[in-house]
Image: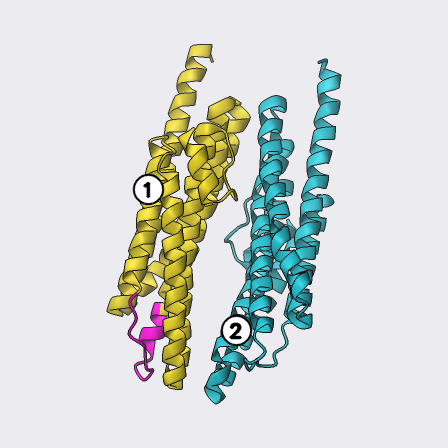
Chain colours: A yellow, B cyan
């Protein structure tokens, strides 16, 4: 291949990689939203479908990992291009785990709706789930547009999601204390709340990888204040 | 640099990378075991130390990620060497998350021991934690010795850990039903049990990456039976 040819192939491969990451992101977002829908509706066949579809998420991960290794081996990217490929390797791990959490929510939804005899506490989880979805969308959008500025916002929203998880836990403890018959279903709901909180964490991880991709600075584990400072530079 | 020189540097860098991964693995194992110790002893200053030390685990991860990117950019490894570096990128993500789970256990230990007035159920978690530690050791040993055969054993032990988590959950539900005053501390213990189960999952991930490193075949998500078949080939 001529130098020109290699460069062109290179751009096409990176572009292809980027759009496949976004497709995977779209799929896990759909899995998550459908799992929340199943939790609310109790539509068991829809819930089974979510559980069955998890292998599609896994396949995306395996294929994208392979694509990254191929690109590195054959095209030997450097600097920002290499950082982009390494970022993809990290992002897809978090996306796959968001898929796992969606599957867990679907399994809890199945448990909660399969047994009509159980007392299920009325508890609102949708608004926190919506924040987590927004975080995921923002992170992937930041990746697509190679724009790291959104990262601070995602980190701030992650705090909201964490606080909301703690509030939900306190609420569920009250339910369980007042009526021990709700203990088993309260635990199912607690695991749903925990899964939402974990999805927020994964979205935050993705946002942090994007900062690394753009600025070449690793901002994981540095805290919200230091992150704000980093982004203002 | 001469070709000879590059090759030598290459081996040294990969060897260095390997030993740093093992050092990080040793650290997270220690964090996990100390957290279990803190849970049993209630030694609050030891518990605070575990929580404070989590940043050391994070630092390992950030530095190792950087080392991997450098090696790829400067030495352009291919085939099994490239797979080894990509495996390290994946392994350290799981090690960092084991560190997070150890920190969570330490926080639950602090909550359980800070408040003497709470009724805490007597429940045995150490034997499952020991299985998870064994899984982690085996996985890292497999990585160090470039030997994938142990992977099946780790996957089988992961099933044990999962089953043990479910049994613990049933036990805790019984405690909570019989005595609602134990609800709050039962939930803390449930989160400890969940953290142990997650550590098992991460150890299993590491074992699967090692199969990929050695055989170039991605065995994630294929199930225990298919894995056994793969390893026998």
Q: Is residue A2 left or right of residue B81?
A: left
The image position of residue A138, as x and y in percent, is 32, 42
Where does label 2 land, which residue? B166
Q: In the rendered image of this protein, does residue B189 appear above or below residue A198?
A: below
Where, quadrant-wise, is the N terminus of chain B in this rendering?
Answer: top right
Residue extending farthest to the left is A41
Residue shown at the point (55%, 69%) measured from the top left:
B111
- Whether residue A116 sits left or right of residue B81 in the image: it is left
Q: Is B155 one of the magenta-colored residues? A: no
> In front here: A26 or A183?
A183
Label 2: element kind? helix
> In this orientation, does residue B111 appear?
yes
Can you identify the residue that label 1 sits on? A138
Viewer-nearest residue: B37 or B49? B49
Disc 1 from disc 2: Cα separation: 36 Å
Q: Numbered disc 1: what chain?
A: A
From the viewer's side, name the closer residue of A175 and B89. Answer: A175
Determine if the magenta segment contains residue A120. Answer: yes
| Chain containing the residue with disc 2 | B
Task: Mark 1 vs mark 2: give the one in front.
Answer: 1
Please report the residue visible at 48 percent of the width from the left and 44 percent of the height from the top: A223
**Residue B49 occupies which quadrant of the picture?**
bottom right
Q: At x 41% / y 60%, what residue is drawn? A: A195
Q: Dominant secondary structure of the magenta stretch? A: loop
User: In this orientation, which residue lies closer to the viewer: B214 or A7?
Assistant: A7
Q: Mark on residue A118?
A: none
Whole-percent x, y for residue B221 in the image: 50, 53
Range of magenta residues: A109-124
Report if the CB atoms under discs 1 and 2 are less than 8 Å apart.
no
């Amino acid at each position: 291949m001529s130098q020109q040819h290699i460069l062109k192939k290179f751009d096409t491969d990176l572009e292809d990689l980027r759009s496949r990451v976004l497709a995977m992101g779209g799929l896990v977002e759909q899995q998550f939203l459908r799992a929340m829908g199943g939790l609310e509706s109790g539509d068991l066949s829809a819930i089974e479908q979510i559980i069955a579809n998890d292998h599609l998420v896994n396949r995306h991960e395996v294929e994208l990992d392979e694509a990254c290794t191929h690109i590195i081996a054959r095209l030997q990217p450097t600097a920002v291009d290499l950082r982009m490929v390494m970022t993809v390797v990290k992002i897809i791990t978090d996306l796959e785990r968001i898929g796992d959490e969606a599957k867990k929510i679907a399994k809890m939804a199945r448990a909660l709706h399969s047994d009509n005899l159980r007392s299920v506490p009325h508890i609102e989880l949708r608004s926190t789930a919506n924040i987590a979805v927004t975080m995921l969308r923002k992170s992937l959008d930041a990746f697509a547009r190679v724009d790291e500025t959104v990262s601070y916002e995602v980190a701030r929203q992650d705090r909201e999601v964490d606080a909301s998880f703690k509030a939900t836990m306190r609420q569920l403890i009250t339910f369980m204390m007042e009526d021990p018959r709700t203990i088993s279903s309260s635990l199912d709901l607690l695991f749903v709340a925990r899964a939402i909180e974990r999805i927020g964490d994964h979205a935050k991880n993705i946002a942090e990888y994007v900062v690394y991709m753009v600025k070449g600075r690793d901002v994981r584990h540095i805290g919200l204040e230091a992150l704000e400072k980093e982004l203002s530079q």
